[in-house]
Amino acid sequence: MPALPSCLLESLWDQFAALLPAHREFAASHPLGCHRRRIPDRKVFEHVVLALVHGSGYERISTPGCSDRTIRRRVKEWAEQGISEAVHALALQAYDRMIGLDLTEISVDGCITKAPCGGEHAGRSPVDRGKQGLKRSTAVDAQGVPLGLVAAGANRHDSPLLDPTLKAAMDQVGTMPERVNVNLDRGYDNNKSPTLLDELGFTGEIAGKGVPAPIQAGKRWTVERTHSWMNGYGKLRRCTEINGAVVEFYLHLAAALVTLRMLIRRAITHYRWDSRPTGRRLK
């Protein structure tokens, strides 16, 4: 059974492959020009998607035609080139062109997941007996489309991550509308968050401390739903990567898949094409 539906996998690969630099079939540095052939990027990409969806180690998903060391080297190479971040930006552009991003209401929140191997973005988790954890700060639009993502240690507070998260969303989207309202939970109820929103020209709706969360959830449920969608990918639920660039590579790759899935689901009722999915549910 494939890790992803073909409508998602092929759409992601088309944009991913267009951003990859050209490589020779053999290593140019070999004196005889007859070194071992380079493993095709498509084959490695399929293994990377398996690692993202199932969260398995590279040794478990390796095959005779693609070793675990090849997957590690290629993922590190793609992470340094910023391929997944560019793919995420292209997915946002496609969604905005076909459906339209609703940037008047933005919600930001953090999510703590496991990071048992530690790493550059890991820290002591306050919700898992001090074990190593990863915090994912995410900004979404009014419909829950992931805009900006920031990775940090689980011991980092949500409030200091608000500035880089909003700036990451602005870098991915580009021009923001004149009126933008940011919805935040009570973890951002301090003096710094309203000041930051004023500096960026945004208005804010921040939940107050001491009031039960379900009563004042408001418009923030979209970011909670997006976090649950992204936690459906095993590599994000239990991140074993140590390199910070690789962690961000998987975060943006998952965000691109979430964006593409929302685009296809909403486009079914707006457009018609020959290869569109027959069902509305995309896992």
Image: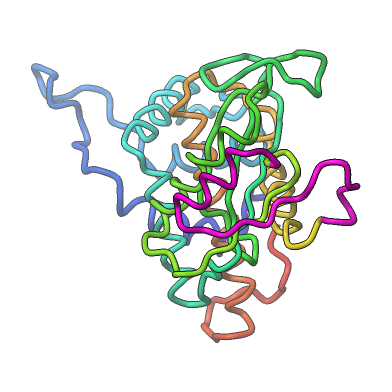
Please state which of residues 108 and 120 is positioned toward the viewer in this rendering. 108
Front one among 251 and 153: 153
Indicate whether residue 164 is drawn in magenta: no
Q: Where 34 sits versus 109, above or below?
A: above
Q: Is residue 250 above or below residue 227?
A: above
> Residue 156, relative to residue 179: is it above or below?
above
Q: Which residue corresponds to the image point at 73% horizontal and 62% vertical from the top-left?
A: 219
Quadrant in the rendering for residue 189 = top right
| Residue at image location 81% in from the left, 20% down from the top | 128
Q: Is residue 137 left or right of residue 36?
A: right
**Which contiguous range is marked in magenta?**
189-216
- Asked whether residue 210 is drawn in magenta, I would say yes
The vertical placement of 124 against 95, above or below, is above
Q: Looking at the figure, which quarter contains the C terminus? A: bottom right
On screen, residue 21 versus residue 48, left or right, reads: left
Give x and y (percent) for residue 13.
Answer: 43, 54
Residue depicted at x 69% and y 63%:
282
Residue at position x 77%, y 21% in the image:
126
Q: Residue 277 location in percent, x, y?
A: 63, 73
Q: Is residue 183 left or right of residue 38?
A: right
Residue 233 lies, in percent from the top left, at 67, 42
Residue 3 drawn at (x, y percent):
64, 47
